[in-house]
Amino acid sequence: MTGQIEDGITASFSEFSFSPSVRVRNSRSDRWIIFIQQILKRTIDIFLSLVFILISLPLMILISVAIKLTSKGPIFFTQKRVGYQGNQFKIIKFRTMRPENKQEEHHEYIQNLLKEDYHLDQNKVITDYFDYIDRRTTKIGNFLRATSLDELPQLLNILLGNMSLVGPRPHPVYEVKEYKDWYKRRLHVKPGLTGWSKLNLRLTPQNYEESILYDLWYVDNWSNRLDIKILLMTVPFVLSMKDAH
């Protein structure tokens, strides 16, 4: 299979490539086990996303009102992201930045961050970007980012099948265009609302490739049991309100 990313960029995936470990499971019974696990994962995604939407609906309404009253602009932020097998979808988040924010600046930051140019001061690249984020983020946006509440609308992405509750975080199209070839293996599973790298490296710019390695570990070791473990770990993680950008 081939997932189209953009401008002729593609990510190739072999048959049964839901996880690299699947490729060594050649027996029919092993393939059936993987298939059943995937069906169970999707069933859990649908059930829990519906439950969470119903439970969090009053909170989402409150957040929507707060965003509208404290800054001009739309309530939601949407952006093209790259998901399973390179397929694009529009991610939905609560807007946390002022409407004059330009995505070109984030694009330039990603290019500089991933560029193997030893003339660039990577620490300065990161510091400048965090300064840019701090300048552009609204007051309510700071709170939403710190608590990850800005991610709540992605429950709709999960319900639609673009995302899963657990998986690598989905990256923008322009970020995937900068991927090294071995990064692309993280696209062998659906992106998630929470994930292994998100729990272990909340601030990933300083250790971008390390976060990719965490994602690849998840791809290689995926199971429904691991997903449940990550979901349970996410609750205290979010409640700790660790700094996020």
Image (spheres, grey):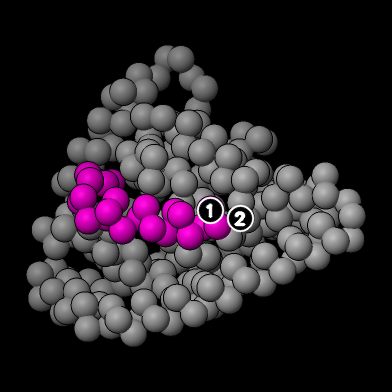
- For residue 226, which numbered disc appears in the image? 1
> Regarding mark 1 in the picture, which secondary structure is present there?
helix
Start-end of magenta stretch: 225-245
**Does the residue at mark 2 contact the one at mark 1 (Cβ under 8 Å)?**
yes
Residue 180 pos. (x, y %): 62, 34
Residue at point 14%, 62% (across, down): 140
Q: Residue at x 11, y 58 (%)?
A: 139
Q: Which residue is mark 2?
A: 223
Q: Is residue 18 left or right of residue 98?
A: right
The residue furthest right is: 27
Q: CA distance from mark 2 to mark 1?
A: 5 Å
Question: Amino acid type of disc 1?
Answer: Leu
Amino acid type, callout 2? Ser
Query: Is residue 8 something that shows in the picture?
Result: no
Q: Where is residue 153? Give x, y as percent.
A: 36, 72
In this view of the protein, which residue sits in the foreground, 159 or 88? 159
Q: Residues within 10 Å of mark 1 (few under 14, many from 20)?
A: some
Q: Quadrant of residue 190?
A: bottom right
Q: Is residue 235 within the magenta segment?
A: yes
The question of residue 228 being in magenta is answered with: yes
Q: Secondary structure at mark 2?
A: loop
| Among the 4 quarters of the image, the one containing residue 55 | bottom left
Q: Which mark is residue 68?
A: none
